[in-house]
Image: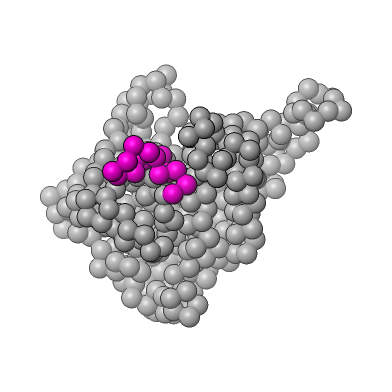
Amino acid sequence: MPDTQHADSVGLVCPQFRHFDTPLALDCGVTLPSYDLCYETYGELNAARDNAVLVCHALSGDAHAAGFHDPEQRKPGWWDNCIGPGKPLDTRRFFVVCSNNLGGCNGSTGPLSVRPGTTHRYGPDFPFVTVRDWVQSQARLADALGIERWAAVMGGSLGGMQVLQWAIDFPDRVRHAIVIAAAPRLSTQNIAFNEVARQAIRSDPDFHDGHYADHGVVPERGLRLARMLGHITYLSDDVLHSRFGRELKEGKIQFNFGVEFQIESYLRYQGESFVNRFDANTYLLMTKSLDYFDPAADFEGDLTRAVSRCTARFLVMSFSSDWRFSPKRSREIVRALLDNDLDVSYVDIESALGHDSFLLPIPQYHKVLGAYFSRIEVGA
């Protein structure tokens, strides 16, 4: 049983829901007449309402960033090592908000939701959503919570892209922008990986053009393969070798197509557990959101112009072994910000753990985050 009462844990938390009746016009040209956002909060909003921090999740994340939903839950929220009393994002000082992105499958309106005025789920008919759409919906959530300006907006990977979009779209509502293991847009290789993952799902015989729920099935094989492929890209070759090497599961070669190597067993486990917690249509939408992200596109490809309205102070972080969103891509963001004479701190953390490093309690990483947050003034 997890220790939900540990001094550095936010403890037991409950998901909250906010319904929005004001239509939301999406980048794809479709307007959502209404929608719900699922979110969680940790810590307390102070009297000055200037200590709120928005945490943006990555591709397969959700609103459950810290703590536990019940005493039997063995695994805490996805960024629990970073959020809590005495942790880098200290909930004794800050009021932390994390919402499930629109189009998600963990509480917010998405493909699993019933379409208004019908008895049927959206399924594959849920409209395409972009990072900019998410930021717009999060801004409405901030309004509903009485938060005029975030002390900081923070996220890794796809979450870091949302941070950058926040700083561009709402410069007066973000004091500090913390962009971790992100990129100003996906490389061609990254788009290619996403397309292979989508094709794995869409070619599954149980996909039924996205209407699998109507057939009482789930495209498990395709979703499993998509997750296995993605997981390989999140880790470095060094960490895969150090963890698994060429170790055989049974100690000798079996001459079959079953699980022979430990790495095969690990990837199959990751794929299987993902099938049990994530929706295939949502995965397709989230990867497309990644592909579409390119704030410089509206400025003739000039990132410097795209961030010219930003006023936030920035902390940009990368990880040495991250080949999916390499340090080079973070430095592109840093250069564009510096070209606008913005206040920017940049740190490349030495890590052998690949892209997943941003989720892990790496001492130097946490030390930098903690030091940065300690300098953010609140309660003025």
Q: Quadrant of the C terminus?
A: bottom left
Question: Is any atom of residue 126 visible in this view?
Answer: yes
Q: Is residue 150 magenta?
A: no
Which of 32 and 269 lies nearest the eye of the viewer?
A: 32
Left/right placement of residue 312 relative to residue 104 reads left
Q: Quadrant of residue 339?
A: bottom left
Q: Quadrant of the N terminus?
A: top left
Q: Residue at x 44, y 25 (%)?
A: 74
Q: Position of residue 83 (x, y in %)?
A: 36, 42
In magenta, the rendered stretch is 111-125
Q: Is residue 112 magenta?
A: yes
Tally of marks: 0
Instruction: Name the magenta segment's main secondary structure.
Output: loop
Left/right placement of residue 4 relative to residue 227 reads left
Q: Residue at x 43, y 76 (%)?
A: 298
Q: Position of residue 47 (x, y in %)?
A: 12, 50
